[in-house]
Amino acid sequence: MIPAQSKILVIQMSKFIFHILIVSVLFASCSKEYSQERMTGVNPPLGNDCSMTTVTPFDSASGRGFGSFHVTFGADDRTQKVELYDSASGTVDYYATFTYINDTIRISANEFFVLDASRRISEYHTLENPSDSNSEHYKYTYEYAPSGQLYHKYWFLASRNPDEPLFAYNYEWVNDNLVRVEAREAGGDKRIVLQAELSYAIDKTVKNYLYCFPEADELAPYILSVNVGKKSRNLLQKIVVKLYDAGGNELDTYNTEYKDYKFSSDDYITEVYASGDIVDGLPIVTGLTKFSYYCK
């Protein structure tokens, strides 16, 4: 029998590696309809109400886009669908549609979000493999501080105990920036499993950039579409993620740096260059990534 903490680490590592593989596959080809190649030179207009709609990784040497992750908004400014295009085959590699019913956002028969009174996500229900109704049922719950930032997250496995979380995640904010994430066993010895540290250029304020939750692979496909509280205020420079073994010893470390940002005239980020490791919770791979926006 595998010890409980080892099982936790296997699950966490599997999720980490699985998301890296998914990102690599999703961005393996050029985008046709939403490529930044089509939008060269387009920056958001001056204003205070623009939302990111397109994320396009580029090959820095050739200037070719490696595929675009795109969100379509409806007349009510809510997400209608999320799509990933493959121009090589002329097909959609991935898509999800959003249906809004009272306090619920339904994505599929097996996936849905529950919203709180402020329209932030409070629960996310999904499956280990959303296309397989017999796979493990996951539930995540999200709690917010009075100041509006994500403060706690809990991850439940239905087969283990639907009422007691397996992991507890704590989020530390300093000067309106997320600076630390720590995941521990929710019960027992509450041993540490994951720790992430984030650093910023505090002299630069950004507008409505990405959420920077490095461990949140469950939200990666929907990170442009859901409300997870307030975002970090300043310019992200570095993320360090550490995984730990059953004895609390450091197992692996992942380092990612962000630099060479470009901005619109009103401080929306239009480009960034990432080096190092892929981060689970961000739709950015290594190299150059460009962003497009929808403005009201």
Image (cartoon, rainbow, N blue to C red):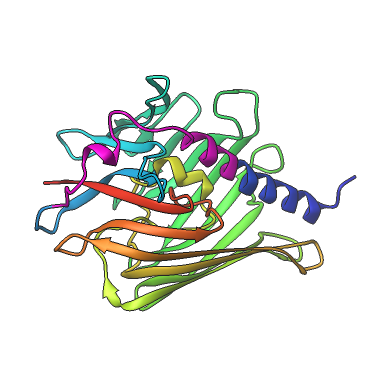
Q: Which residues are magenta?
A: 19-44
Instruction: Decide which of 29, 82 is in the foreground and name it.
Output: 29
- Reply yes or no: does residue 296 show up in magenta: no
Residue 120 can be seen in this image = no
Q: Nearer the viewer, residue 4 or 53?
A: 53
Q: Nearer the viewer, residue 198 or 104?
A: 198
Q: Position of residue 295 (x, y in %)?
A: 14, 47
Q: Is residue 261 visible?
A: yes
**Going by the picture, which residue comes out furthest to the top?**
90
Which quadrant holds residue 101? top left
Left or right, 127 with reference to 281: right
Left or right position of 92 against 171: left
Q: Residue furthest front?
A: 62
Q: Position of residue 86 (x, y in %)?
A: 40, 27
Look at the picture and state if 139 lies above or below 278: above
Quadrant housing residue 196? bottom right
Q: Is residue 82 above or below residue 185?
A: above
Judged from this view, the residue extending furthest toward the right is: 1
Residue drawn at (18%, 49%) of the image: 41
Would residue 93 be found to the left or right of residue 15 on screen?
left
Between residues 34 and 205, which one lies in front from this camera angle?
A: 34
Image position, residue 191 (x, y; %): 73, 66
The reply to whether the magenta stretch includes residue 37 is yes
Residue at 37% of width from left, 51% of height from top? 289
Residue 234, position as x, y percentages in the image: 32, 71
- The N terminus - image quarter: top right
**Residue at 73%, 53% in the rendered image:** 9
Tell me the residue at 30%/36% (across/down). 35
